[in-house]
Image (cartoon, helix red, strand yellow):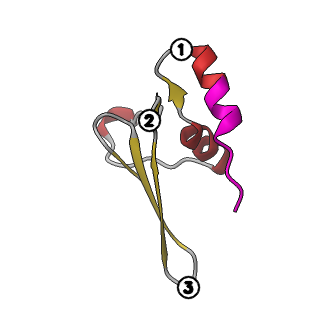
Amino acid sequence: MFAGKSATRLKVLWFDRNGLCLLYKRLHRAVFELPAAANGAVSIHIDGAALARLLAGVGKGGEATRNRLTSRSRCGF
């Protein structure tokens, strides 16, 4: 994963046996709540649940905005 300094843009890159896949997501009224690396580590590992929470984003206005955004921003593939 790669995130912009403002935490409004996120790129996720993964390998799925056939090649690389790229997910790019940009938030307008929210930010991504990025996990912190411990003790100066350059990378971290997260599970699927943590990735889902990360992609949901957190509203800039507080908890009420967060609840509204997470209920609207579900995508189906």
Side (left or right) of 65 relative to 9:
right
Q: Residue at label 2? A: 28
Read off the magenta span: 68-77
* Nearer to us in this view, 2 or 62: 62
Q: Element type at marker 3?
A: loop
> Real-space Cα distance between discs 2 and 1?
14 Å
Residue 74 covered by magenta stretch:
yes
Which amino acid type is marked by label 2?
His
Which residue is pictured at 49% across the width and 15% down the height?
61
Q: Element type at marker 1?
A: loop
Label 2, residues with CA under 10 Å away: few <14, some 14-19, many ≥20: few
> Real-space Cα distance between discs 3 and 1?
40 Å
3 over 77 or under it: above or below: above
The picture quadrant where one finds residue 50 is: top right
Check if mark 2's residue and mark 3's residue have beta carbons within 8 Å. Answer: no
27 over 13 or under it: above or below: above
